[in-house]
Image (spheres, helix red, strand yellow):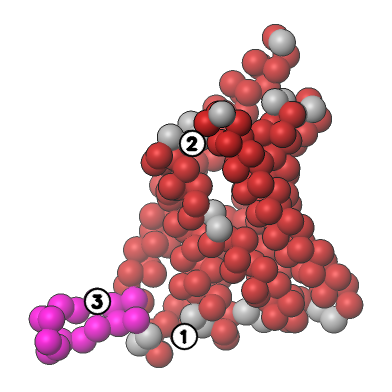
Amino acid sequence: MVAALKRAYLAVYNWAVFSGWAQVLYYAVTTLLRSGHQDVYAAVERPLQLAQTAAVLEIIHGLVGLVRSPISATLPQIGSRLFVTWGILWSFPETTTHILVSSLVISWSITEIIRYSFFGTKELLGSAPSWLQWLRYSSFLIMYPTGISSELGLIYIALEYIKASEKYSFRLPNAWNYSFDYFYASIMVLLIYVPGSPHMYTYMLGQRKKALSKSRTM
């Protein structure tokens, strides 16, 4: 009974988030073709925020044992995306008309449509077709570099606006005797991408080899 409820919940979760990302991709592509990249963010803002923020539940799923995904891999990936979604695009609207927003949301949405449909199908049917499994473990070969490049570019573009606005920064003196500079914190995030991105890519290559070799022996 518990196992059935778990699978039902995960199926609903995966297909619900899948529908959110499908909406993001549809709005992004149609807006890009109809009026250009400068209008893409305005078209996808709300579904993008909802779909990406829903990924926080994946961290909880890992912590409580609903899924076997390691938190060490899930947390930095979701954290970096939330930073770009809320800490860059939502916080600094000056970045939202850049063409990198289009490459970002298209890369993210294609990746997530494949990933959530793969896991949703597995929860519903017990397994996923081989072509979907191949896409799940191969699409990142292109989508990860384009997505990461877009994230890095948008954070870099936002730096001048972060510095000028001093948003989210705390200066001394204050009641808490604490200072924080969002500009330098954002630079630190950029620096973390340098070792973090190749590490994550290598990790996903390992996962791909393991998953596809296993499927060939079945």
Residue 66: give its label: 2
Question: Is residue 3 visible to the viewer in this orientation of the structure?
Answer: yes
Q: Earlier in the sequence, mark 1 or mark 2?
A: 2
Residue 93 rendering spot, x and y as whole percentages? 57, 84
For the N terminus, give its image quadrant.
top right
Dot 2 crowding, Cα within 10 Å, few <14, some 14–19, many 20+: some
Question: Compared to 132, does 175 lie above or below?
Answer: below
Residue 180: give its label: 3
Snapshot quadrant of residue 134: top right
Question: Compared to 127, does 89 lie above or below?
Answer: below
> Image check: 9 left or right of 164?
right
Question: Compared to 185, does 75 lie above or below?
Answer: above
Say which of 149 and 208 sits in front. 208
- For the residue marked with disc 3, what is the amino acid? Phe
Q: Earlier in the sequence, mark 2 or mark 3?
A: 2
The range drawn in magenta is 168-182
- Residue at the farthest front position: 1
User: Can you tell which of label 1 and label 3 is closer to the viewer?
Assistant: 3
**Residue at 33%, 69% in the rendered image:** 185
**Residue at 54%, 68% in the rendered image:** 85
- For the residue marked with disc 1, what is the amino acid? Tyr
The residue that label 1 is drawn on is: 161
